[in-house]
Amino acid sequence: MRIVQDRVRMQSNRVEKVRTELSSAQQTIVELQETVKNGNLNVQNQIQAILEDLQIIGQQIPSDERMNEIEQSIENVQKSVANQIIYNRDFEERIQKLEQANEDKE
């Protein structure tokens, strides 16, 4: 009889140990689910922030028509600078000729 009681007690201890481990495992699962939930929420927030940034960037990009206007303005400035350089060279040549003529008169 005592052997049976010892075996029942041992079996009860094993069952209690398994129940404790099961409870601990269930708590771990709940914690992991919460972690995943928080991680998903964090990812969603990051995605939303990225989408908002992209929208702001998209608003700052000029339209094709505006880009064409900008390119045309750049070309006009380049032509104007080139013409000014040519004009300045011609002007310098005229000044040198006048200086030379002035020296020749003296």
Image (tube, rainbow, N blue to C red):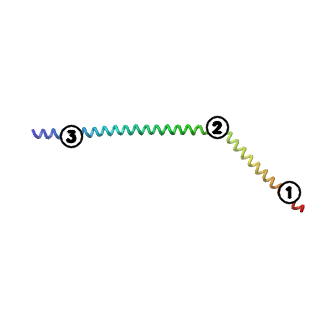
Foreground: disc 3 or disc 1: 1
Q: Name the image quarter holding residue 59.
A: top right
Q: Amino acid at mark 2?
A: Asp
Instruction: Give percent across and percent down for residue 3.
Output: 11, 40
Q: Quadrant of the C terminus?
A: bottom right
Instruction: Give percent across and percent down for residue 11.
Output: 18, 39
Contact between marks 1 and 2 (CB within 8 A): the answer is no
Crowd around label 1: few <14 · some 14–19 · many ≥20 (10 Å):
few
Q: Earlier in the sequence, mark 3 or mark 1?
A: 3
Vertically, is 84 above or below 62? below
Q: CA distance from mark 1 to mark 2?
A: 51 Å
Which residue is located at x 25 percent, y 39 percent?
20
Q: Residue furthest left?
A: 1
Instruction: Give percent across and percent down for residue 52.
Output: 53, 37
Q: Which residue is mark 2?
A: 64
Q: Which residue is mark 1?
A: 98
Crowd around label 2: few <14 · some 14–19 · many ≥20 (10 Å):
few
Q: Which residue is mark 3?
A: 14
Q: Residue furthest bottom?
A: 106
Contact between marks 3 and 1 (CB within 8 A): the answer is no
Crowd around label 3: few <14 · some 14–19 · many ≥20 (10 Å):
few
Foreground: disc 2 or disc 3: 3
Q: Quadrant of the N terminus?
A: top left
Q: Amino acid at mark 1?
A: Leu
Foreground: disc 1 or disc 2: 1
Which residue is located at x 63 percent, y 38 percent?
62
Q: CA distance from mark 2 to mark 3?
A: 76 Å
Q: Is residue 106 left or right of residue 21?
A: right
Q: CA distance from mark 3 to mark 1?
A: 116 Å
